Image: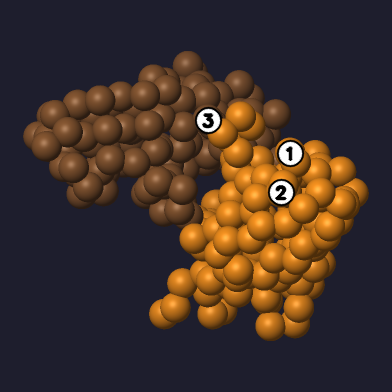
Chain colours: A brown, B orange
C-alpha cells in the first residue's frame, strides 16, 4: 500500500527558482523522510522530520510537516541543474515495521 | 567509510531462471532492507534483515527470498523469474532496525527478464 503521495508528479523550473514538492499520507506517522534519486540510481537521504516537529532546515532544503493535514512539503531554494532528480517521501506506517515510499516528484531544473 | 555496494549492477535473465543479488552494507550497519523499483509500482518494500533474522516482509510472493550473514551482508533470491520481475532492486542499510534511522541506499541492481 502506498502511504506517501507526492504532488506534483513532475515539475520543471529554471535555475535559481525555488521548487516546492508536497507529500500527503493517510495514517498517523512517527516520522517522515525525504529522499532524492538521480536517474535510476540509489536514493540519497535528505532529511528526516519527526511527528512532533513542524519545520526543519538543511542547507537549501526546508521541510515542513502538518500532522493535522497529514502532509509535508519540501522546498528547495535557489535551485541548480544538479538538483534535477526524483524526490520521494517515505513514511513509517502507524506502528509499522517498514517504510512506505510515495511515487515521487520528478524535478527538472533547466539551466 | 565505504558506501553500500550491490553486485552485480546489471543482469539479464530469461523467464523461469533464478537469480541471486548481493548487498554489502556500510561497515557497522546491522539492518539491511531490500526494495523493488518499477515505473508502474514505484518503490516497494521486499524485506528487512537485522542480525541475520528477517524482521519484516512486504507483500511479495514466496519466489522472493533473502538472507543475511553474520557480517551483515545480505543476499536476495528470486526463483522462477517472470517478465514482471524486471526492475531495479535496491538495497539499503541502516545502523539498526527501526524507522527513526535514515537508510543508506546502494546503486541498485538492474534486472531484466526476457
Q: Distance between the residues labelled 1 and 2?
A: 8 Å
Helix, strand or loop status at disc 3 = loop
Residue at image point 68% right, 76% down = B72
Q: Quadrant of the N terminus of chain B?
A: bottom left
Name the chain letter of the residue that bears numbered label 2.
Answer: B
The residue closer to the viewer here, B87 or B41, is B87
Horizontal side of B84 relative to A11 (left or right) equals right
Contact (CB < 8 A) between labels 2 and 3? no
Q: Is residue A111 visible?
A: yes
Residue on which disc 2 sits: B113
Name the chain letter of the residue that bears numbered label 1.
Answer: B
Q: How far apart are marks 1 and 3 (CA)?
A: 18 Å
The residue closer to the viewer here, B91 or A92, is B91
Residue A67 image offset from top left, x and y in percent:
48, 24
Residue on which disc 3 sits: A103
Tell me which corner region of the image, top left, top right, bottom left or bottom right, holds residue B85: top right
Residue at image point 75% right, 66% down = B20
Horizontal side of A89 relative to B99 (left or right) equals left
Residue B29 image offset from top left, x and y in percent:
58, 73
Horizontal side of A77 relative to B65 (left or right) equals left
Contact (CB < 8 A) between labels 1 and 2? yes
The residue closer to the viewer here, B1 or B28, is B1
Residue at image point 58% right, 61% down = B10
Helix, strand or loop status at disc 2 = strand
Q: Specify few, some or many for label 3: CA neighbours under 10 Å numbering under 14, 14-19, or 20 or more.
A: many
Name the chain letter of the residue that bears numbered label 3.
Answer: A
Q: Specify few, some or many for label 1: CA neighbours under 10 Å numbering under 14, 14-19, or 20 or more.
A: few
Q: Distance between the residues labelled 2 and 3?
A: 23 Å
Q: Specify few, some or many for label 2: CA neighbours under 10 Å numbering under 14, 14-19, or 20 or more.
A: some
Residue on which disc 1 sits: B84
Amino acid at each position: 500500500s502506498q502511504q506517501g503521495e507526492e504532488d506534483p508528479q513532475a515539475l520543471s523550473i529554471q535555475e535559481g527558482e525555488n521548487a516546492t514538492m508536497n507529500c500527503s499520507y493517510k495514517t498517523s506517522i512517527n516520522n517522515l523522510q525525504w529522499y532524492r534519486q538521480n536517474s535510476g540510481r540509489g536514493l540519497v537521504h535528505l532529511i528526516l522530520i519527526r511527528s512532533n516537529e513542524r519545520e526543519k532546515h538543511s542547507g537549501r532544503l526546508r521541510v515542513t510537516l502538518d500532522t493535522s493535514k497529514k502532509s509535508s512539503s519540501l522546498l528547495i531554494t535557489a535551485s541548480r541543474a544538479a538538483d534535477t532528480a526524483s524526490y520521494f517521501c517515505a513514511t513509517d506506517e502507524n506502528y509499522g515495521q517498514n517504510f512506505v515510499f510515495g511515487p515521487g516528484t520528478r524535478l527538472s531544473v533547466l539551466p | 567509510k565505504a558506501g553500500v555496494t550491490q553486485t552485480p549492477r546489471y543482469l539479464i535473465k530469461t523467464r523461469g531462471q533464478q537469480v541471486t543479488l548481493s548487498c554489502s552494507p556500510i561497515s557497522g550497519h546491522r539492518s539491511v532492507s531490500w526494495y523493488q523499483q518499477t515505473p508502474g509500482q514505484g518503490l516497494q518494500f521486499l524485506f528487512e534483515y537485522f542480525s541475520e533474522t528477517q524482521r519484516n516482509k512486504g507483500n511479495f510472493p514466496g519466489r522472493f527470498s533473502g538472507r543475511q550473514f553474520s557480517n551483515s551482508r545480505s543476499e536476495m533470491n528470486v526463483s522462477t523469474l517472470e517478465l514482471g520481475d524486471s526492475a531495479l532492486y535496491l538495497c539499503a542499510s541502516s545502523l539498526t532496525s527501526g524507522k527513526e534511522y535514515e537508510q543508506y541506499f546502494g546503486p541498485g541492481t538492474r534486472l531484466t527478464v526476457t
